[in-house]
Amino acid sequence: MNDTELMRIIREAIAQATQGEKAAPECKCVCDGEVEDISAYSLREEFNIPNPYNKEEYMRIKAKTDARLGVWRAGPRPLTRTTLRVRADNAAAMDAVFNDVHEEYLERNNLKTYQTKCDSKETYLTRPDLGRVFDDATAAQIKADCIAEPDVQIVVSDGLSSSAVEANIDAVLPAIYNGLKATGLKVGTPFFVKYGRVGAEDSVAQILGAKVTVILLGERPGLATSSSLSAYCVYGGYPGIPEANRTVVSNIHKAGTPPVEAGAYIAELCKQMYDKKASGLDLKA
Amino acid sequence: MKLKTRLNGKTYEFRDVKDVLAKANEPKSGDRYLGIAPETVSEKIAAKVVLSELTVADITENPVVPYEKDEVTRVEIDSMNKRMYDQFKNYTIAEVREWIMDHKTTTNDLYRASYAWIGETVAAVAKICSASDLIYGASKCCRPTRCETQIGLPGTLSFRAQCNSSTDDPETIVLGVQEAVSFGSGDLCFGINPVEDTVETTQRISHALRDFKDQWEIPTQISVLSHVTTQMQAVREGAPLSMFFQSIAGTQSACEAFGVDKALLNEAYDLAKQECYGTGMNKLYFETGQGSEMSIDCDEGADEMTLEARTYGFARNFEPFGVNNVTGFIGPETIYDGKEMIRGNLEDHFMAKIIGLPMGMAPCFTNHTGITQDDQEIACLLLNAANCNYYMGVPMGDDVMLAYQDVSFHDDNTMRELSHRKPAPEFHKWAIKMGILDEDGRLGERAGDASMFFAK
């Protein structure tokens, strides 16, 4: 077959295809509604076993756990609906990890951003050491911008979940400030630490000479929730302080400890830590 | 000992055995983090070439942490068999690899020879193996064990029913275990990780599991995975455990961080003899995983794969009922992506089987890596081809307490069907009687409905 012949065949094929297009009837389908949002159904209420021996008892116990039980099967494989829901929850979790907190959200909450030594999300994920420290220029900038030697310094960080920050911070932060108002403590300038690990609060404490430091940080997302926030509180923090010196308030999200409640509690903790000059195991002692 | 070679126009010289072992490793995030990974692909292959020409004696006499300094090294060396070692000490690593693959080398030969190796030796062999080598070599090994029941026999595949609760609620834990059992899972054990590491929680969960097991006369083991000292106290106070569980690692300092040493495990074994329900000679259950040492700064500068192999050398001394890794559990600072996770799992399984362990596997992932469900299932399928002893069984693979994904009840059955394997014999007989499984180990009509256990 030579080129001319090939071109002829192609032209004919194109002509035929175009003709077909013209001849096709107009789309008459009616789009009435949409496919169910499978991320919305309650795992605790979902039940797929056909003709179970005892559904009532199953549901009574299932109501207490997010474990994916009563899911049935297709041969040995899961049902499509069940497997797609796992994928949907995994998607929410991965998006929480791999997407950044939106800048507008931080602006709205008056949080200026300072980045740790991590230059990218990938560095952040593979180098926990770099997520705890700032380079000299950033450290100097933090010192220049923020109130020096505060009694309580609050910082926010993406950690492993940007969703946790965006779902909770605008409720947690005001609650902490309200709680601290009555104490008369000198409260520092809050800011956002991009690519931060828990230990970033130790660098912050050192740079600003803070007494109590709190980092509100997005936790590693599971499939059940991708927006869980934790507060790690430390008295007299410095890089290398033992982990046992941290007091942790975890599981802050709407289905766990609600953010407003958590904020009030964190404020109370800060006052206690300030008064007792201790945190973590030392605070309990 | 030759630590130098020329490859692709360049000369490569390695500092010591530890350096060769690290440089010969396939890509691992944890090795890059420590700065001990090879810089180029050619450097990696040069290290494999050098490694292949070292002898078993070269490796054994140069463990990555000195004998005097580290209890793990002492245990793995002291648990060797001198006669077997003498037989193999002059073999090069290349020759050991070929001896393992040889058709003439039988399952029994491999088991006897396992006492010639320490962790570093099996790591060295695995480092010059491709994926198919790792699968083929391991598939020839067989290591049955007995606690309350016997597992690991040829042609069988078992599962641990891992149905954790975020609130340590016995009723939801038992519902999960009932569903596992209704899927033919749980013949390795009912094994629950508690949230609270207390004697009271260990008691509460183990009694709930034992009650279910007794009521339906299910032939399996019961394990609650609190710290071994917590379990020991619980058992002294009457907790009906079959055996003791503990996480272990490949250096003394990492084991210390986990609160465990040789003396404690010997004490646990002796207590299990007197107080646990398992009367077979295998009374301990261990978990391990690549990267655990470096994640807590206890790596001694050695690569994560070699440290994992040393963990197996340590484990062997205590005649465990089962050992499984959870490589993929920690995160991208140790295992970066699906490729690293799959390779790591094949290595772990091979190294453990060659050193003589009853090895099960938990190919798994967290949500803060690029590892996907497909990667995890591919690892599972490859390990199945390698005859792995057991997997976990987690509802839809989603562990609601530990917040990571592992093997599901559905995958469990798929693996059994694909490899034509059956459950452990005692459990299989029971499951046939219950109508859960047929003679071939396939799911029956009502399999998957846990409410079959509500009637009684």
Image (cartoon, rainbow, N blue to C red):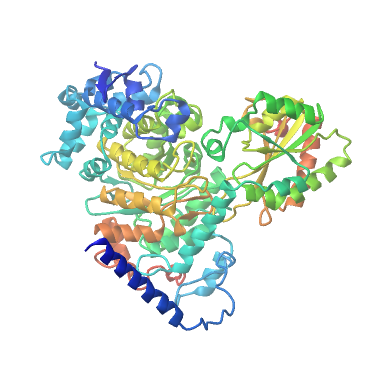
As displayed, is residue B285 above or below residue A85?
above
Evaluate whether residue B259 shows in this view: no
As displayed, is residue B235 above or below residue A244?
below
Quadrant occupied by the C terminus of chain B: bottom left
Residue at the far front: name it: A4
Residue at the far left: name it: B104
Count of labels in the image: 0
**Residue nearer the viewer, B195 or A22:** A22
Q: Would residue B375 be found to the left or right of residue A184 on screen?
A: left
* Residue B275 pos. (x, y %): 41, 43
Quadrant occupied by the N terminus of chain B: top left
* Residue B317 pos. (x, y %): 32, 32
Q: Would residue A125 be found to the left or right of residue A245 on screen?
A: left
Please tell me in which quadrant of the rendered image residue B136 appears.
Answer: top left
Evaluate whether residue A245 shows in this view: yes
Q: Would residue B334 be found to the left or right of residue A75 on screen?
A: right
Q: Would residue A271 be found to the left or right of residue A32 on screen?
A: right
* Residue A190 pos. (x, y %): 77, 38
* Residue B249 pos. (x, y %): 42, 32
**Residue nearer the viewer, B231 or A279:** A279
Residue found at x 56% / y 43%: B198
Residue found at x 22% / y 43%: B141
Please tell me in which quadrant of the rendered image residue A140 appears.
Answer: top right
